[in-house]
């Protein structure tokens, strides 16, 4: 059921909402009684000048008034508490879900939309739980109460009075049906607006470099305006039906007075009964007037809840198995057995078979888009193979719990993503409790220590989101330090030193080799210098391994990719070698 | 530069101040007419509302005893008409208020966004992007209700109270004073809780912003989190942030929800006080000819209730005001953020660049007292290609950033064709510069849209030609939808090299007079890079270019190489000049050479 879903998120706090409703109802009852006390004061105390009864009566009135207010207060507070608890649980669960999702999920969902689901949409749940539910309960109870009183006194009168309710319901249903899609649309538009702003913020460098401020403003205005329009449109739907529902409610009040008056004259009911009816008019009016607004808000909540459920029930492509077959000490032996990987109809990797011994260093080179990153992404299971298998220490990576698999693989990604946090926290990202020595040691190996210590805040310096403000080379080195701090038996370096000068790269490589426990290392690079000292170099072209061997072996293949690249990158140097030596 | 991260509240220097509040009138003023209409409608509606009890009274007291069915029905029809009119007016007011509040949101958001476009890198680099986003989207959404309806309702409530006050005084000054005696009690509650209320609401806004910032970073960095198996840790952090948000949300609730009951209780106390005073203290005033004047007292209590009803509404509006201020001050904070790099008054357009570039004693610091460039001077002739080499963090990127005036120099001057960059318009300058940054940013849209970002009026053919020139066409045309392939946010799904190629095509399309490549080809394979460079070389013949790269093959071909070290030009000259000098560049070059030589000799392989 639609409403139960949100309700269930309150978990153990459901009692709060229920008690809150009890307070609510008691409050309404007290509110009903209160006027009678005050009229009694006028009729029984002041009129006969029986002043000795004044103080006790006032005391009673105040006690009721204060109790009523206390009920209201606790009704609100308990509902807020229950709803905040639900919001907390829901937000927390959505966050967990997000962290389980793999790359394809993120490439098919816009960030702005995801943020919206986890913030604005959840706020609608909050609003529903602590505003709509109590109002619904109140309204229905009030209406029932009035209905019963009216029925007891005069069924005929009641029938006349309630004759308009079916019409109210018809229009309420109409409102309900029309307004929901408008709210969904408004919500969609908010995500679009969110996305434009989000991209503009993240891409501020490009915007400035190309002087596209005005274009961005136009793009933004389009979405901003559209958001305004759809919001006005959604409100207009409500303004179309709301007044009709209100009018019907007011017809009821008018009928109450007119029909009642006529019936008194005709002797069908007594004047006293009419006074009672008029006194109960609010119990009819309030719920009927509330109806439109409640439907409006409820539909808005449902539109948001749909979005939340989309995310909550989104399927997870890469799932962690129930049993963990992770060996105790992973040595870092990696095998690819006839691995094929396809994205839709496009084959990205085709029949890859590869054996990497523990402690070995393997270099991977190949043209742009040949599948290098995809290949290494299979090891920590960012994606899963289409066919074949990838094994770590003889166990298929799909048989590891994701946590234990990924704890054993250190990786630096092509797109360096740093968090807007201190350098220390970024380096210790994989091992938050690691001692500072490990952070510094890793930074030293990655040749990051030198520039980090020179920063005014040292390791406590906070970097911008994605490490903006740092140079490409600096970001790459922090990212490398981050991977090293994990001391995992497998280390994957995807284009990690492309923005680092060669001298530094060499330093880093020497330090990597000098580490006590050598990790199985896979290096993806475009520079020959990055891979030429590797135990094995693999050339990947169009998803296939076309060459494999040591630098020396590959250099013998004069028509091969490696040799060609080597000549292109170092050919000029080679020529000069002769020249330099002659000089 | 104080940087901010997800769990640090952005403290405000400005305390609650009416100046801030008044600023919002700039926006409201634009809709003066609508506000007046809204007030008019509301006043009519309240007058009509006063008629309802009168009609009821007439029916019960006069018509029913008379047994006049016809008149009862006629009055019923009038009653209905009044009600319908009331509903109609209410609808008209709501329509205006919807339009106005949506317009206000749109206006404020536009101003914030527009201002953001003017802010420099340093603004974006010094705080999580989620926090900026929250301001533009969520905060702005939150202020409209108050600015539209809150203010109008507040005004109406006050008007209402003044009217009723007038009526009360006409009945009994003493009892009116009794009614007013409730005010100070209420004010004590308001004043006593004000500080805490405001604090909690500010904190609530802050915690929300922190949570969103963390969420946003975690969405973008989900892969890193997974790679480092840190999900559980981050979940805990997020839960902690949620917990804080909940805490302050509820604390604000505890006080905020107290407002209405408080005023309602005072209303009842005042009512009781009227009775007590009328009976015990001022009984003589109410006894005329030995008869106790009940009517006056009943009227007084009715007015007292009516006087306190708007007061209760004011209490609610006050809560809203406090919330709105917490958001509004953050919004104004963005608008107040000084624009560090802006056109100077009287700045002129830079004429078409010929390509002479001069740095004269340029000193630059991102943070005070930490110079990144120390008095750098050089001169580049039109058409010259310059390679910048040197250790990471030496200042290469800074030199490049100063060329496009992404930052202002701290001291000294940067000149292009003799024009000081400080004196030309940013637009005319940057439009002529082609900058390829380290971080390639791909917008969501299509590949061709991303290329066209370089020149918005370019035709498809021109975009494709640019892609061909940089050899991006090879991979693009292999894709199923070719140039119309959808690109995801940040170019997810494209390899780093492919993204660089698209960015290259984009830059090329902008037809820059000066080209700047900052590690622009680091992820492109060497074969493609060679092709790209030959394509670019032909197109940029005669145009000045600056290149930051680490591949020596790229560097060597440049006319001049500058070796930057610790914010200074340590060496400069052509490749052969620098080789002869046997300085830093020579060392760098030879270390590469030796590395290669070692390997080739060891393996007995000669290329």
Image (cartoon, coloured by chain):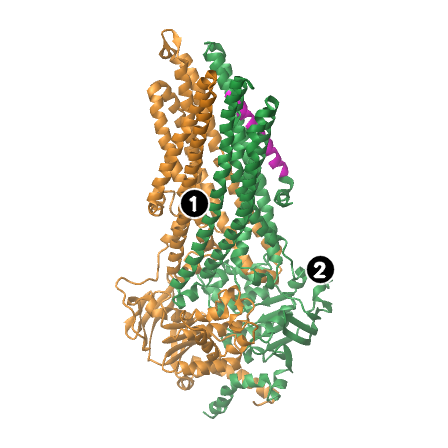
Chain to which mark 1 belongs: B
Tell me what hue chain A is rendered in. green
| Mark carried by residue B98 | 1
Please check the rendered image and state whether residue B64 is part of the magenta-colored stretch, yes or no: no
| Mark carried by residue A321 | 2
Q: Which residues make up the magenta segment?
A: A14-35
Q: Position of residue A356 (x, y in %)?
A: 68, 74
Q: Label 1's element? A: helix
Q: Position of residue B278 (x, y in %)?
A: 40, 15
Q: Residue furthest bottom?
A: A582
**Chain painted in orange in the figure:** B
In this view, the residue in front, A389 or B238, is A389
Q: Label 2's element? A: loop
Picture layout, residue B408 above or below residue A91: below
Picture layout, residue B238 above or below residue A482: above
- A396 left or right, relative to B82: right
Q: Tell me if mark 2 has few (under 14), some (14-19) or many (20+) residues whose alpha carbon lies within 10 angstroms of its own.
A: few
In whole angstroms, how far apart are the C-alphas of marks 2 and 1? 52 Å
| Mark carried by residue B109 | none
In this view, the residue in front, A139 or B152, is A139
- B383 left or right, relative to A420: left
């Amino acid at each position: 059921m639609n409403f139960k879903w949100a309700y269930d998120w309150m978990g153990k706090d459901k009692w709060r909402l229920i008690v809150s409703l009890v307070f609510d109802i008691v409050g309404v009852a007290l509110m009903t009684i209160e006027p009678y006390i005050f009229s009694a004061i006028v009729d029984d105390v002041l009129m006969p000048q029986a002043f000795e009864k004044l103080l006790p009566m006032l005391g009673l009135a105040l006690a009721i008034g204060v109790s009523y207010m206390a009920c209201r207060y606790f009704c609100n507070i308990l509902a807020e508490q229950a709803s905040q608890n639900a919001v907390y649980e829901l937000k927390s669960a959505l966050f967990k879900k997000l962290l389980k999702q793999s790359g394809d999920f993120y490439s098919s969902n816009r960030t702005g939309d995801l943020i919206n689901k986890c913030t604005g949409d959840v706020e609608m749940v909050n609003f529903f739980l602590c505003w709509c539910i109590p109002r619904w309960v109140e309204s229905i109870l009030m209406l029932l109460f009035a209905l019963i009183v009216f029925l007891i006194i005069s069924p005929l009168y009641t029938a006349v009075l309630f004759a308009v309710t079916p019409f109210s319901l018809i229009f309420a249903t109409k409102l309900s049906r029309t307004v929901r899609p408008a709210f969904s649309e408004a919500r969609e538009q908010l995500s679009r607006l969110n996305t434009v702003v989000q991209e503009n913020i993240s891409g501020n460098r490009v915007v400035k470099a190309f002087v596209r401020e005005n274009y961005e403003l136009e793009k933004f205005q389009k979405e901003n305006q559209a958001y305004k329009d759809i919001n006005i449109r959604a409100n207009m739907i409500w303004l179309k039906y709301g007044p009709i529902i209100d009018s019907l409610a007011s017809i009821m009040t008018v009928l109450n007075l007119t029909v009642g008056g006529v019936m008194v004259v005709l002797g069908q009911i007594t004047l006293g009964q009419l006074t009672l009816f008029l006194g109960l008019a609010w119990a009819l009016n309030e719920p009927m007037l509330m109806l439109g607004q409640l439907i409006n808000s409820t539909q808005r909540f449902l539109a948001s809840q749909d979005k939340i459920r989309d995310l909550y029930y989104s399927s997870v492509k890469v799932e962690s198995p129930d049993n963990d077959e992770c060996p105790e000490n992973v040595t870092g032996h990696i095998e690819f057995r006839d691995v094929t990987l396809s994205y839709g109809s496009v084959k990205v990797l085709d029949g890859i078979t590869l054996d990497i011994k523990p402690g070995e260093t393997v270099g991977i080179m190949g043209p742009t888009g040949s599948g290098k990153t995809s290949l290494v992404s299979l090891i920590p299971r960012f994606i899963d193979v289409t066919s074949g298998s990838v094994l770590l220490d003889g166990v298929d990576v799909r048989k590891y719990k994701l946590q234990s698999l990924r704890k054993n693989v250190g990786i630096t990604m092509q797109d360096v993503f740093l968090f807007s946090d201190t350098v220390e926290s970024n380096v210790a990202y994989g091992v938050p409790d690691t001692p500072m020595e490990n952070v510094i040691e890793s930074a030293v190996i990655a040749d990051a220590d030198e520039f980090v210590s020179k920063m005014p805040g040292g390791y406590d310096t906070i970097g911008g989101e994605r490490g903006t403000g740092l140079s490409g080379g600096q970001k790459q080195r922090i990212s490398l330090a981050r991977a090293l701090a994990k001391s995992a038996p497998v280390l994957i370096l995807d284009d990690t030193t492309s923005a680092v000068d060669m001298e530094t790269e060499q330093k880093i490589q020497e330090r990597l080799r000098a580490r006590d426990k050598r990790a199985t290392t896979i290096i993806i690079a475009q520079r020959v210098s990055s891979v030429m000292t590797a135990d094995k170099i693999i050339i990947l072209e169009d998803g296939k391994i076309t060459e494999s061997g040591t630098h020396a072996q590959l250099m013998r293949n004069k028509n091969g990719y490696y040799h060609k690249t080597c000549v292109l990158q170092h050919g000029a140097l080679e020529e000069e070698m002769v020249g330099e030596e002659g000089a | 530069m104080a940087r901010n991260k997800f769990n640090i509240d952005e403290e405000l220097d400005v305390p609650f101040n009416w100046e801030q509040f008044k600023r919002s009138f700039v926006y409201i003023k634009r809709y003066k007419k609508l506000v007046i209409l809204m007030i008019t409608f509301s006043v009519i509606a309240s007058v009509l509302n006063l008629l309802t009890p009168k009609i009821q009274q007439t029916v019960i007291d006069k018509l029913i005893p008379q047994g006049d069915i016809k008149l009862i029905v006629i009055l019923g029809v009038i009653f209905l008409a009044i009600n319908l009119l009331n509903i109609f007016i209410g609808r008209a007011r709501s329509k205006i208020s919807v339009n106005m509040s949506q317009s206000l949101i749109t206006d404020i958001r536009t101003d914030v966004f527009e201002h953001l476009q003017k802010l420099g890198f340093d603004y974006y680099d010094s705080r999580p992007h989620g926090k900026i986003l929250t301001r533009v989207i969520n905060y702005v959404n939150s202020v409209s209700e108050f600015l539209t309806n809150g203010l109008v309702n507040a005004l109406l409530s006050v008007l209402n109270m003044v009217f009723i006050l007038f009526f009360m005084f006409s009945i009994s000054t003493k009892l009116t004073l009794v009614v007013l005696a409730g005010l100070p009690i209420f004010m004590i509650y308001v004043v006593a809780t004000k500080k805490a209320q405001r604090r909690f609401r500010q904190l609530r806004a802050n915690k929300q912003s922190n949570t969103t910032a963390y969420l946003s970073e975690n969405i973008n960095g989900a892969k890193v989190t997974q790679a480092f198996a840190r999900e559980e840790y981050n979940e805990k952090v997020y839960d902690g942030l949620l917990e804080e948000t909940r805490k302050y949300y509820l604390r604000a609730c505890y006080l905020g929800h107290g407002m209405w009951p408080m005023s309602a209780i005072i209303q009842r106390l005042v009512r009781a006080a009227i009775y007590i005073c009328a009976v015990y203290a001022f009984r003589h005033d109410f006894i005329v000819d030995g008869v106790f004047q009940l009517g006056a007292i009943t009227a007084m209590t009715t007015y007292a209730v009516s006087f306190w009803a708007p007061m209760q509404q004011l209490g609610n509006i006050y809560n809203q005001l406090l919330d709105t201020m917490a958001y509004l001050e953050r919004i104004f904070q963005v608008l107040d953020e000084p624009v560090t790099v802006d056109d100077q008054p009287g700045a002129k357009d830079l004429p078409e660049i010929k390509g002479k570039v001069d740095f004269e004693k340029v000193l630059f610091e991102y943070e005070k007292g930490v110079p990144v460039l120390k008095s750098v001077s050089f001169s580049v002739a039109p058409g010259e290609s310059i390679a910048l080499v040197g250790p990471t963090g030496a200042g290469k990127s800074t030199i490049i950033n100063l060329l496009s005036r992404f930052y202002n120099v701290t001291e000294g001057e940067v000149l292009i064709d003799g024009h000081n960059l400080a004196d030309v318009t940013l637009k005319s300058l940057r439009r002529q510069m082609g900058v390829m940054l380290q971080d390639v940013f791909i917008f969501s849209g299509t590949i061709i849209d991303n290329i066209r970002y370089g020149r918005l009026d370019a035709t498809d053919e021109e975009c494709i030609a640019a892609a061909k020139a940089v050899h991006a066409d090879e991979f693009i045309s292999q894709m199923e939808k070719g140039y119309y392939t959808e690109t995801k946010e940040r170019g997810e799904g494209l390899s780093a090299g492919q993204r660089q190629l698209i960015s290259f095509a984009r830059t090329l399309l902008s037809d820059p007079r000066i080209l700047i490549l900052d590690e622009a080809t680091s992820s492109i394979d060497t074969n493609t890079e060679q092709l790209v460079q030959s394509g670019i070389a032909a197109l940029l013949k005669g145009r000045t270019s600056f290149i930051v790269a680490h591949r020596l093959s790229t560097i060597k071909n440049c006319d001049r190489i500058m070796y930057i070290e610790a914010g200074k030009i340590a060496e400069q000259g052509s490749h052969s000049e620098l080789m002869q000098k046997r300085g830093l560049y020579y060392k760098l070059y030879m270390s590469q050479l030796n590395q290669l030589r070692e390997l080739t000799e060891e393996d007995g392989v000669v290329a």
